[in-house]
């Protein structure tokens, strides 16, 4: 690991940013009724605008990578700089002071897919792909969910059959964010249907531009189409692009899922407590004891979630493996988001369903419509509760096709 001090690193980072980006203006205090009242969880933009924004984001990412700030913590053999997480946090804090293109396009590829490639791909393949991902020459997506295997990922039916030095993939994936602008994807397939459902899976990296892969947009109720269906029509992938060992894809999937839950669970929930407090004051409810109690509960939950996530991230940074804390963090986030929906609906009443043009009212409908998606993304709430119950609390597994009831041997007269 490089021994550059944080002070020297900060000087280097600021020198780069001062030359290549403009400082953001000081953030103004939130004032009810001023500026945009947008409360949407998901930014709904048309494909043409998205293409322009993606181009700007990729240009910035390439400039940042070429200057040595694109893969700070990565191994040097994979194009990284081998710096510490403290260096990464410092750079993120500094860059946040500057007006740079939105980097959200790369969240899945760099937050979920790239770490899996680093840990499970063959070294020469990781050395080829990771620099392209971190430089934004390529964008990555995650191909896990299927129409009949969403939360129960191990029930997936997309097949991969060995044919010499290649695998032939046939099947369908669904709810794939960003598939339409991605260059590569991480897919989990069933490679041995004779094995128990968690055992016969294998992971692969796929070329999203191959004509044997068909991408169809899905329109969600918020109005956007960020999700896609993806069809594999006898797509061929070389065995060298396999992730991990054959039929050991469940461990590959867990690596990705834990990173996904870490990135989602650490979010703010899309709304600020300040905005909620000012809403309460505007509508004359600041002295209502029940409203104050609900507001306090949201504040407490959001802070507990933040500390829980930080504890889990510190464990990972110290060399530990991601554990069930990620599921707890994701559950805590969606619980707080659901509490926010209930709170906003109670305060605004009919204003949230009737667009009267009043600032800070109907705009919340986009938030309310977006929360159900967050309760599914990264593992549905019900599945995560099972994980916490079984792995944290030690409760028996639910009875299913691959489990036996703990009461099976009890005879009833």
Image (tube, rainbow, N blue to C red):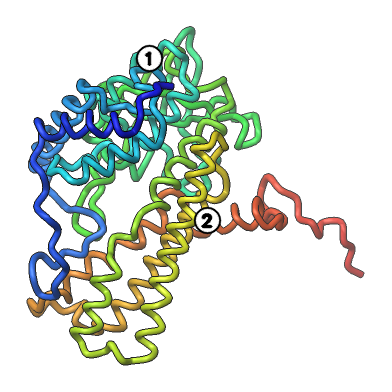
Q: Is residue 29 above or below residue 330?
A: below
User: In which quadrant of the rendered image does the N terminus lie?
Assistant: top left
Q: On the picture, is 34 further left or further right than 258?
A: left
Query: Which residue is most to the right?
Result: 413
- Identify the mark nearer the N-term, 1 or 2: 1
Look at the numbered disc 2 and give the secondary structure of its residue. helix
Residue at 53% in and 47% down: 152
Quadrant in the rendering for residue 364: bottom left
Q: What residue is disc 2 on?
A: 328
Looking at the picture, tell me which residue is in the foreground, 193 or 47.
47
Q: Is residue 120 above or below residue 60?
A: above
Query: How packed is label 1: few (under 14 Cα within 10 Å), some, or many (20 or more)?
Result: some
Quadrant in the rendering for residue 93: top left
Whether residue 141 is visible: no
Residue at 40% in and 23% down: 3
Q: Position of residue 167 (x, y in %)?
A: 45, 17
Looking at the picture, tell me which residue is in the foreground, 149 or 354.
354
Q: Position of residue 157 (x, y in %)?
A: 49, 36
Q: What residue is disc 1 on?
A: 127
């Amino acid at each position: 690991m490089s021994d550059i001090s944080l002070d020297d690193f900060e000087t280097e980072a600021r020198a780069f940013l001062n030359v290549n980006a403009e400082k953001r203006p000081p953030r103004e205090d939130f004032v009810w009724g001023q500026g945009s009242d947008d409360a949407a969880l998901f930014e709904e933009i048309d494909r043409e605008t998205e293409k322009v924004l993606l181009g700007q984001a990729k240009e910035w990412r390439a400039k940042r990578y070429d200057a040595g700030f694109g893969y700070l913590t990565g191994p040097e053999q994979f194009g990284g700089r081998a710096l510490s997480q403290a260096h990464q946090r410092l750079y993120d804090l500094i860059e946040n002071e500057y007006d740079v293109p939105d980097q959200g396009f790369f969240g899945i590829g760099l937050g979920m897919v790239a770490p899996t490639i680093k840990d499970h791909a063959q070294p020469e393949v990781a050395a080829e792909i990771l620099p392209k991902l971190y430089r934004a020459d390529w964008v990555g997506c995650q191909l896990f969910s299927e129409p009949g295997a969403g939360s129960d990922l191990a029930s997936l039916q997309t097949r991969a059959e060995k044919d010499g030095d290649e695998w032939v993939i046939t099947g369908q994936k669904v709810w794939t964010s960003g598939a339409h602008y991605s260059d590569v994807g991480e897919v989990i397939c069933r490679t041995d249907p004779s094995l128990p459902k968690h055992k016969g899976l294998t992971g692969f990296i796929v070329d999203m531009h191959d004509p044997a892969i068909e991408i169809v947009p899905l329109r969600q109720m918020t109005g956007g189409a960020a999700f896609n269906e993806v069809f594999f029509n006898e797509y061929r992938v070389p065995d060298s692009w396999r992730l991990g060992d054959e039929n050991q894809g469940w461990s590959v999937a867990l690596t990705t899922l834990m990173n996904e839950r870490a990135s989602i669970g650490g979010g703010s929930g899309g709304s600020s407590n300040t905005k909620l407090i000012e809403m309460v004051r505007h509508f004359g409810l600041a002295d209502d004891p029940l409203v104050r109690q609900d507001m306090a509960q949201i504040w407490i939950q959001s802070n507990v979630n933040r500390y829980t996530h930080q504890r889990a991230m510190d464990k990972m940074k110290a060399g530990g493996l991601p554990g069930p804390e990620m599921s707890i963090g994701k559950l805590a986030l969606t619980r707080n988001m659901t509490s926010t929906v209930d709170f906003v609906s109670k305060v605004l009443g009919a204003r949230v369903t009737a667009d009267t043009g009043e600032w800070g009212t109907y705009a919340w409908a986009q938030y309310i419509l977006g929360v159900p998606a967050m309760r599914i993304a990264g593992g549905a709430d019900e599945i995560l509760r099972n994980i916490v119950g079984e792995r944290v609390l030690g409760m028996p597994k639910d009875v299913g096709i691959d489990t036996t009831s703990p009461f099976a041997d009890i005879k009833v007269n």
